Amino acid sequence: MRTLGCGVGWTLLEELHSFVVGWHARIEDVYVFPLLGDEVKPFSNDHMLISKYGDAVIKEKRKDWAERYVKILLEHNLNEEERVFRDLDTSVMGAILEELRKYEPYERITGVRVKNLLGTPSSP
């Protein structure tokens, strides 16, 4: 959070937020949550709140809000891992991996090499 004192830090936070809302949450809402029914509705609702709060954080450039935003993301993802993804049917992974291939900044943002997940070279 120390980097928020400069423009680069806010740019990184904007990139993170764009990834979270534009790819990560969207993939869960489109491919994962429909398979799991109403019990995961609160997690989908969290995505809407995270989107709105993140937009406000970036607009207002408030470091205290940014710190809270990151804590919310971490807590949300931990809860998803513990309550949602533990027993997820792996058949949905094919569609998610196809989306990975289409989302160009995925490797740069996450550090995960798409070709390692797909078993094929990633596109240039």
Image (cartoon, grey):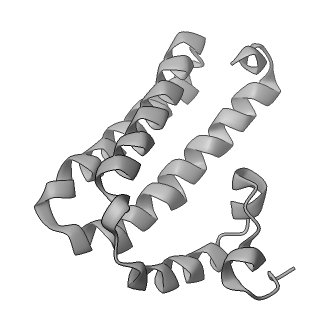
Any part of residue 2 in sight: yes
Residue at the image position 78 percent from the left and 56 percent from the top: 108
> Is residue 92 placed above or below 86 in the rendered structure?
below
Residue 90 percent across, percent down from the top left: 42, 79
Q: Quadrant of residue 12?
A: top right
Residue at the image position 31 percent from the left and 57 percent from the top: 84
User: Farthest left residue?
Assistant: 38
Q: Quadrant of residue 41?
A: bottom left
Residue at the image position 21 percent from the left and 68 percent from the top: 36
Quadrant (top left/top right/bottom left/bottom right) for the N terminus: top right
Residue 21 percent across, percent down from the top left: 48, 51
- 17 left or right of 43 in image: right
- 69 left or right of 46 in image: right
Residue at the image position 50 percent from the left and 76 percent from the top: 96
- 113 left or right of 64 in image: right
Any part of residue 105 in sight: no
> Is residue 86 placed above or below 52 in the rendered structure?
below
Residue 17 percent across, percent down from the top left: 56, 42
> Is residue 50 placed above or below 114 in the rendered structure?
above
